[in-house]
Image (cartoon, grey):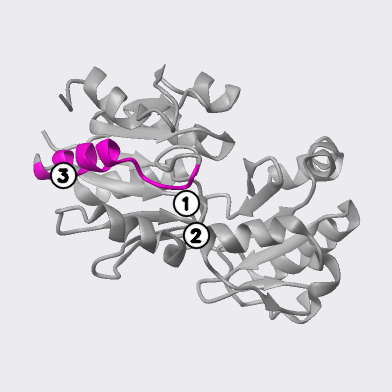
């Protein structure tokens, strides 16, 4: 039986020191040697996943990744795009105006660049966190000059948690939730994607592409942007350090990301010794 094993990065595959433990890497390599396929599923852009792909050095011939929280799924090895659900420049401009009104910094991610407007991101510590996690730079831009037809993977509000907590309770936020996929990837990030873009939807499309039944998919996650993936997978597994909504969406909870929760769960499923 061939399985598809999906792994969130921050708080799941990565420890608190943003490393991958030796046992976790060994367990994942073993699963691919048995014929399974491992997919990294993250809010990061594709290039932001490269260090983990290189470190794991998995033996499979394909290397699928789910990036931008599900807006893009591709085979990192061949470059083949499996699914792609984007926003428009018009969407980015609208979300920018709403974010500014809410008092948030704004990021807009295309395949090639990460746009910010300096007047609303200067001194914003969360912009620095995003750039550090993904090892990408930011490009200053006037959002009101973004063309209607420019494609974006996602738009993100970056602000103090209390600012985002207040915003998501507003009628304006509720209206946006009906038009976009809206995710809280971290307490200080609120992300907007095409309504057809999410980790769960992308995982199912990838499973279909690979000919793997839903019941043979396994997903690991720890946060709100992982919940639909945990629900969609045949077996959803939340980390002990995860949020309450992630745990509620999972079939069971494993050890935390600093205590080899992934190999512990694979051991429970008789997939690792």
Q: Nearer the viewer, mark 1 or mark 3?
A: 3
Residue at 61% in and 77% down: 150
Q: Would residue 154 be seen by someone viewing this image from the given angle?
A: no
Which residue in the structure is indicated by mark 3? Answer: 32
Residue at 46% in and 62% down: 48
Magenta span contains residue 24: yes
Comparing 253 with 65, the one in front is: 253
Q: Nearer the viewer, mark 3 or mark 2?
A: 3
Callouts 1 and 3 close, C-beta under 8 Å: no
Which residue in the structure is indicated by mark 2? Answer: 85
Give the left or right position of residue 25, taking residue 101 as reference: left
Q: Residues within 10 Å of mark 2 (few under 14, many from 20)?
A: some
Q: Which span of residues is magenta-colored?
A: 17-33
Looking at the rendered structure, the secondary structure element under dot 3 is helix
Comparing 271 with 258, the one in front is: 258
Looking at the rendered structure, the secondary structure element under dot 2 is loop
Q: Position of residue 51 (x, y in %)?
A: 38, 61
CA–CA distance between discs 1 and 3? 22 Å
Which residue in the structure is indicated by mark 1? Answer: 70
Q: Position of residue 41 (x, y in %)?
A: 41, 48
């Amino acid at each position: 039986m061939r399985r598809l094993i999906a792994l969130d990065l921050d708080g799941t595959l990565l420890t608190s020191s943003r490393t991958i433990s030796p046992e976790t890497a060994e367990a994942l390599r073993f699963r691919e040697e048995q014929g399974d396929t491992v997919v990294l599923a993250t809010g990061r852009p594709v290039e932001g996943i490269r260090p983990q792909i290189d470190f794991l050095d998995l033996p499979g011939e394909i290397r699928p990744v789910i990036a931008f929280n599900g807006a893009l799924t591709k085979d990192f090895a061949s470059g083949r795009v499996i699914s792609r659900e984007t926003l428009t420049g018009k969407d980015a401009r609208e979300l920018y105006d709403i974010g500014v009104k809410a008092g948030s910094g704004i990021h807009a991610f295309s395949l090639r660049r990460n746009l910010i407007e300096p007047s609303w991101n200067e001194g914003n510590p969360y912009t620095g966190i995003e750039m550090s996690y993904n090892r990408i730079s930011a490009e200053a831009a006037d959002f009101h000059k973004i063309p209607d037809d420019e494609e974006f993977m996602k738009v993100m509000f970056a602000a103090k948690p209390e600012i985002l907590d207040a915003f998501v309770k507003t009628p304006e936020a509720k209206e946006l939730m009906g038009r976009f996929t809206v995710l809280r990837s971290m307490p200080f990030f609120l992300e907007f994607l095409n309504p057809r873009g999410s980790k769960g939807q992308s995982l199912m499309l990838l499973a279909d592409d690979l000919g793997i039944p839903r019941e043979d998919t396994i997903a690991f996650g720890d946060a709100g942007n992982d919940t639909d993936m945990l629900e969609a997978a045949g077996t959803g597994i939340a980390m002990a350090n995860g949020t309450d909504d992630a745990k509620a969406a999972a079939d069971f909870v494993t050890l935390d990301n600093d205590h080899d929760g992934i190999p512990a769960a694979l051991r429970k499923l008789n997939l690792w010794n």
